[in-house]
Amino acid sequence: MTPLNRVPLLLSRAGTASALTFVVAGAAITVPGVAPRASAATVAIEALHIAASKKGSPYQWGATGPHRFDCSGLTLYSFKRAGKKLPRTAAQQYNKSHHVASSHRRRGDLVFFHYGRSVYHVGIYAGKGRIWHAPKTGAVVRKEKIWTRSVWYGRVR
């Protein structure tokens, strides 16, 4: 008998909550490792959508939303709303992220702009060589083409 075939029996013996717990736990045991990756991808895409929803919000140095942002404030806000905590600055976010090669970048990954070894800007990868970011004073949150090859990529886990 498969776990799903046992659900009616469990419902009659243990109650609905126990049956649902069994089914959820059984799925996690049956397919190890799939749920965390799917969850990470879902969080990254959700953060990307949150950042995109802030299109047109003004840049303000040190701002973390919900109406004004600096670059790392936008990434911090977006991932926090999606369920993941990030440090405050772009450099701290780089150090906390799982570094990935540009050939393995995915939508929702963080894009870190650097000069030498110093990270000075961050955005969220939107695909097709573009990012959502809060660029600078006088600008607004927008999607823009990556303008340099001096970038590193980081994945939030």
Image (tube, grey):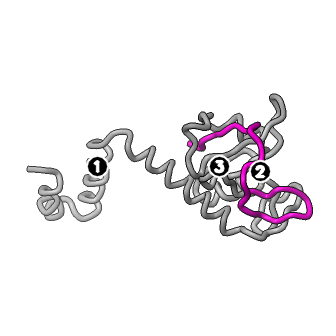
Q: Position of residue 67 (x, y in %)?
A: 78, 69
Q: Are marks 1 and 2 in contact (CB under 8 Å)?
A: no
Instruction: Tell me where residue 157 appears, x and y as whole percent.
Output: 56, 42
Residue at the image position 73 percent from the left and 68 percent from the top: 55
Q: Which residue lies furthest to the top in this view?
A: 117
Q: What residue type is labelled 2?
A: Ser
Query: The residue under label 1 is which amino acid type?
Result: Ala
- Marks 1 and 2 sit apart, C-alpha to C-alpha, by 36 Å
- Is 116 displayed left or right of 48 in the figure? right
Answer whether residue 117 is magenta in the image.
Answer: no
Q: Is residue 146 magenta?
A: yes
95 or 104: nearer the eye?
104
The vertical placement of 120 against 12, above or below, is above
Q: Residue 142: give x, y in percent of width and height.
A: 75, 63
Q: Who comes first in sequence, dot 1 or dot 2?
A: 1
As drawn, the label of residue 27 is: 1
Q: Which residues are drawn in magenta?
A: 133-157
* Most common secondary structure along the magenta stretch: loop
Between 156 and 142, the residue placed more toward the observer is 142
Q: Name the residue carrying label 3.
A: 85
Q: Mark 2 points at which residue?
A: 72
Residue placed at 66% from the left, 46% from the top? 110
Please name the amino acid that badge 3 sits on.
Lys
How many residues crowd mark 2 within 10 Å: few (<14), some (14–19), many (20+)? many
